[in-house]
Amino acid sequence: MSSESLNLFSFRGRIKILHLTWVAFFITFFAWFNHAPLLMAISKSLSLTPDQVKTLLILNVALTIPARVVIGMLTDKYGPRLTYSLLLAIGSVPCFIFALADNFMQAAIGRFLLGFIGAGFVVGIRMVSEWFPARQLGTAEGIYGGWGNFGSAAAAMSLPTIALFFGGDNGWRYAIGITGVIALVYSVIYYFSVTDTPKGSTYFKPKKIGAMEVTSSGDFVLLLIMKVPMYAALALLTWKLSSGVNLISSLAATLIYCGLGLLYLLDARKTYSINREIFTNPPAPVHRYKFKQVAVLNLLYFATFGSELAVVSMLPLFFSETFTLDPVKAGLLASAYAFMNLMSRPAGGLISDRWGRKPTLLILTAGLALGYFTMSLIDAEWPLYLAVIAAMACSFFVQAGEGAVFAVVPLIKRRLTGQIAGMTGAYGNVGAVFYLTVLSLVSYQTFFMVIGITALLGFTALLLLEEPEGQMAEVHPDGSVSMIDVA
């Protein structure tokens, strides 16, 4: 394979790793969103109320917020091969729990736990960054993210048909159970098929584990600030479960709020423990990185991937209710939104590689804001084909934006790539919780309008991003320094 091109028809070297890793990601999303196209059948089978259905949508993305942060740390420490394999195996269990649920409480537990498998995305970001040079990294990460993300569209297109094949009231159970079996089997395949780095390369690990390292006192303060929305999203979920569907009591909600506050303080203490040295002995300039870069990417992923998670979850219902469609047809049409991942996300990474990271993000963020403002105008008076085209056009900018975000993430600090990807990925889920909570309170049209407004806020923050250039330094176990190109 030429070092200057990506021969995607090859199954050797780095291309083999790319293919095996995007398939792992594909399976995590296939399992994670196995409920969305089957919601009507699930709702009927378990006698769920509309509020309970919307609660399941929120629960599905809740655990992924802390899971992505934790999985990012474990990936940096133990390597993506072991981490991805264990995540797939463990993530299969909630699939079986949900498939066997007999009531809302059991289904809620299954969906909440299934959010854990959504952290798989983070692992592959580190794996791909180990195998591809900077000049190809945006494209490779885009292919990984885009083709893997297509798992949600594949679920929307295939699972209703699988459920109909088995038939009866339990058809949806078989369909969801199958996704768990696939995840379990592939966990073994992946473990025995990949390595963490090319032969002879060093896998750089963080000096300490438990919190992200920063390199200045100002960055330390910004890191603590950026942690707040992740805890706030969990508090928002608690409020929804308490006041929205009365799944938990007011007392239990209060205890959870207090627990989240205490957990944040402990997190801040651990973060200080990891980074206390920077206040007395700051690292040399060559070893520093700007956490501002991470903060901006977090906000952008809030608007891009956060909105995608929310829209993928609700779009089948939106098309069904707006245009009075049967569940199978609504699911197929809604899958067009996620279908765009096959080309959109790789396109975002490719454009970033060719014409610059920041300019690409500026154009795509403006486009996704315009796309959601357009979707806010869709109603029953629209021709169905035009509504689908609007959704697909919007999704191009959303998913290309995601690809462009993760074309930057691996270029900030190599040994922290898993943790940076974990935090940025978690912000996507923070966005999803926020948007789905908004959806439970307002109309579909207002929901799309809110996403467009937050995208404009992300565009403003993007003006602070600095184009990656030069090299970043990493230290080998023997103390020698390796310079890694980022441009």
Image: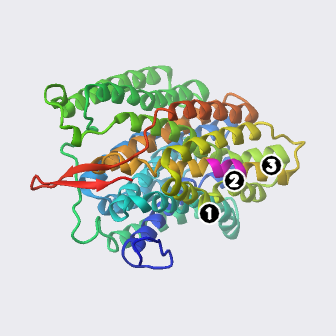
Secondary structure state at the residue bearing disc 3: helix
In whole angstroms, how far apart are the C-alphas of marks 2 and 3?
A: 25 Å
Which residue was labeled with disc 3?
387
Residue 377 image position (x, y, % from top left): 80, 37
Mark 3 is surrounded, within 10 Å at the Cα level, by few (under 14), some (14 to 19) or many (20 or more) other residues, namely: many
Q: Nearer the viewer, mark 2 or mark 1?
A: 1
In the depicted view, which residue is nearer to us: 83 or 125? Answer: 125
Q: Nearer the viewer, mark 1 or mark 3?
A: 3
Residue in the picture at 51% in, 43% down: 61
Mark 3 or mark 2, which is nearer the start of the sequence? 2
Secondary structure state at the residue bearing disc 1: helix
> As drawn, is 137 to the left or to the right of 361?
left
Residue 173 image position (x, y, % from top left): 59, 59
Mark 2 is surrounded, within 10 Å at the Cα level, by few (under 14), some (14 to 19) or many (20 or more) other residues, namely: many
Secondary structure state at the residue bearing disc 2: helix
In whole angstroms, how far apart are the C-alphas of marks 1 and 3?
A: 21 Å
User: The magenta stretch spans which residues?
Assistant: 393-397
Name the disc covering residue 154, or none. Answer: 1
Q: Quadrant of the N terminus?
A: bottom left
Which residue was labeled with disc 2?
41
In whole angstroms, how far apart are the C-alphas of marks 2 and 1?
A: 18 Å
Residue 274 visible in the current orientation = yes
